[in-house]
Amino acid sequence: MDNSGGIAASLAGRYATALFQLAQESKAIDKVESSFVAIDTALNESKDFKALTTNPLITRDQASDIVAALSKKMKLDPLTTKTLGVLAQNRRLSEIASVSAAFQKLAANDRGEIRADVTSARPLSAAQEKELQKQLKKRMGSDVALTLNTDPEILGGLIVKIGSEMIDSSIKTRLNTLSHAMKG
């Protein structure tokens, strides 16, 4: 039975599915997932790294060399390093975040977890993250793996997406709702 939820239909999904199968065979799912968490953090925190992934002026070989150096510095596992090299050679570095999300979803499905995308105005503390997981587990009836994002424009509160369900308690949305209500 395929738990991928249509992941393999996208370009990033095909890369993630192939990588997941290799990781499964090598019993390295956790290592690859940890590498992608590190990559996601780097993409969110480093404008230079994010720019590298979208710069059309960087040649395939330059991109491959940069990715190899970053992989070594970040101590990424060999499968993730090789996948990043393939993405660089195929001029698909812009797909890194999508491949990461798809891989993490496959890994969560494999563990029987539900994946939730959580957006907050500021990074959540470990205690807040744990409490959110506890509340979502109570609501969903199973373990929930979180993908954390920050977006200062929501001002405060959270936006939680689980599958097709969205819980939006952001201050920005509340202010917009109030604004529309006041206009009549």
Image (cartoon, grey):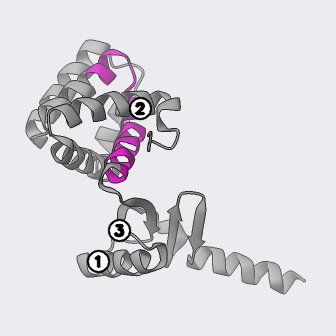
Q: Is residue 107 above or below residue 56?
A: below
Q: Which mark is residue 130?
A: 1
Q: In the figure, is residue 173 to the left or right of 11?
A: right
Q: Is residue 171 above or below residue 23?
A: below
- Does the CB distance between marks 2 and 3 fall below 8 Å? no
For the C terminus, the quadrant is: bottom right
Residue 176 at x, y percent in the picture: 71, 75
Main secondary structure of the magenta stretch: helix
Q: Which residue is mark 3?
A: 143
Q: Nearer the viewer, mark 2 or mark 3?
A: 3
Residue 51 at x, y percent in the picture: 37, 36
Q: Residue at x 38, y 78 (%)?
A: 132
Inspect this view and state whether residue 147 appears.
yes
Q: Which residue is mark 2?
A: 94
- Does the CB distance between marks 1 and 3 fall below 8 Å? no
Instruction: Identify residue type, mark 2.
Output: Ser
